[in-house]
Amino acid sequence: MLVIGVLLVLTLCCVQPTLSSWGDKMYRFQDCLTECSALCYKKGYPKDLPLTLRVFGWACGDECKYQCMHEVTEYDVQHSRPIKQFYGKWPFVRLFGIQEPASAIFSLLNGVGHLIGWRRYRNSVPPHHKMYNLWRSYMLVNINAWLWSTVFHSRDISWTEKLDYFSATSLVLCSIFCFFVRVAGPEKRLVCGCFGAVLLILFCCHMFYLGMVKMDYSYNIAANVAIGIINMTGWILWCAKNLRQQPYLWKCIVISASLFFLVGLEVFDFPPLWWIFDAHSLWHLSTIPFCYFWYSFLIDDCRYQMEEDKRPKEA
């Protein structure tokens, strides 16, 4: 059943973008874009944009795409036609130059959530604990990923897109590495180091392919979803096996199981509500509370390890 579910998720991830992203190919959109672009050589709007737009890198051509996108979308709404994607994105209403305000704000709040969670962890776990440095690195990778997610959703251009995608991949690979170290034990440095080296090589190959060969969106989504599902499944199975001895593991099970089902928000997309909240932004919103429970789980787990380390000495 799990294999079928994984295949279904990956298949839908690959198919969905090709079905809905054709608004920019419509004659009405292209005709509007041609007329607007001709004005870019004249003084005034849309050539001379306000500072709030120029700060985020909006140029005349970008403004034309934005205005024509909403012109076509308004026409579709008035005639009860389905909402279309343009250049792979839904028609959002920007806010002070921020292209996808909901996703940008929720991404930022995820980063803040990890900072708050780490502060609680740091105040509860001594720095000499064997997992301390690993979870600190995990926190930094998360904050980096959410930072670039915020930047990307604020302004979608080539370099912000790549940094967001690469950071997201580094996050899922870091998560699966942390799981491996926790299960194998940080004492097995050679084994953990070899596994980490393999993941690093895969990450470099992934970046090289997307950055230098082809920006393959379907492959990128499928790879990240597959690794994420493997990671979540591993945590659930390991926690279920040790739940009787470590009751606090229910937190990890609930988080992993919830994320497993919330992946559906990344698959079954829909046009943005009020032109602000799409499925992807709700995915980012849903992950914010997990920061609290995840670091609570890490604190409990480290305390359990410290108690376990004391037992042989007492015997």
Image (cartoon, helix red, strand yellow):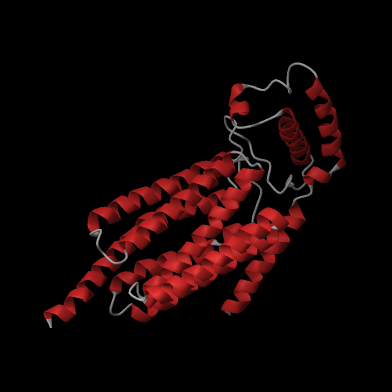
Using the rendered view, name the quadrant where residue 151 is placed: top right
Q: Is residue 18 left or right of residue 5?
A: right
Residue found 44% across the figure and 50% down from its top: 143
Residue 299 vertical placement versus 144 (above, below): below
Q: Is residue 146 visible?
A: yes
Residue 45 percent across, percent down from the top left:
73, 20
Q: Residue at x 47, y 44 (%)?
A: 108
What is the residue that sits farthest to the left in this orientation?
314
Callout count: 0
**Is residue 197 left or right of 238 when viewed as pictured?**
right
Say which of 258 and 74 sits in front: 258
Q: Taking 164 as reference, is 237 left or right?
A: left
Image coords of residue 311 (percent x, y): 17, 78
Report x, y in % for residue 278: 60, 48
- Residue sticking out furthest to the front: 190
- Residue 268 makes an appearance in the image: no
Residue positioned 23% across, 59% down in the render: 126
Question: Which residue is farthest bottom?
Answer: 315
Pick the quarter of the image with the C terminus.
bottom left
Quarter of the image with the N terminus is bottom right
* Relative depth, front residue between 19 and 65: 65
- Give x and y (percent) for residue 98: 58, 35
Residues 144 and 46: in front is 144
Q: Quadrant of residue 178?
A: bottom left
